[in-house]
Amino acid sequence: MNDTAAPTESETTVLQSALRGLACKCPRCGEGKLYAGFLTLAPRCDRCDLDYAFIDTGDGPAIFIIMLAGAIVVGCALVVEVKYQPPFWLHALLWLPLILATTLLPLRAMKSLLIALQFHHKAAPGRLVDRAK
């Protein structure tokens, strides 16, 4: 038995799956690329040939990022406004780059994190259960 072998997908821990997601790697093997573009998914893993057709994150990553970025930017803007009362043009100059940085930079990693967790937990669309028996 080879002790250095990588764990199979059933032995993968949530932490390993999350780290694969944050690294934007394949959720199964952790080596292949997940993206073909900035947010465009590749059709399949170039290492383990996992088909990425199952992936459906919807608006989840964007919502998480918007909520976190909104809290950071609004909190900072309120502190600066109360303490220094700068003109509105200075607010725009300060906060527009911060908004872009806090929304665009983590979006790719957040999307791949949700993909990896979706794969780890074998998420599937909801189904109605017939309980009339």
Image (tube, rainbow, N blue to C red):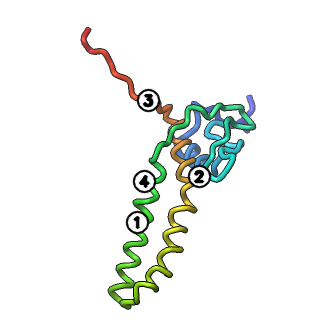
> Horizontal and vertical percent for residue 86?
40, 89
Q: Residues within 10 Å of mark 1 (few under 14, many from 20)?
A: some
68 sits to left or right of 24: left
Alpha carbons under labels 2 and 1: distance apart: 21 Å
Q: Of callouts 3 and 2, which one flags the residue occurring earlier in the amino acid sequence?
A: 2
Three-letter amino acid code of the residue under disc 3: Pro
Q: Of callouts 2 and 4, which one flags the residue occurring earlier in the amino acid sequence?
A: 2
In this view, 70 is above or below 16:
below
The residue at 50%/74% (across/down) is: 96
Quadrant of res 82: bottom left
Which label sits on residue 70?
1
Three-letter amino acid code of the residue under disc 4: Ile
The residue at 66%/46% (across/down) is: 35
In this view, 85 is above or below 13:
below
Alpha carbons under labels 3 and 1: distance apart: 30 Å
**Which quarter of the rendering shows the C terminus?**
top left
Q: Of callouts 2 and 1, which one flags the residue occurring earlier in the amino acid sequence?
A: 2
Residue at which label 3 appears: 125
Q: Residues within 10 Å of mark 4 (few under 14, many from 20)?
A: few
From the image, state whether disc 2 or disc 4 is nearer to you.
Answer: 4
Residue at which label 4 appears: 63
Task: Between residue 83 and residue 28, name the one nearer to us.
Answer: 83
Which residue is situated farthest in the top direction here? Answer: 133
Which label sits on residue 28?
none
Residue at which label 2 appears: 22
72 sits to left or right of 131: right
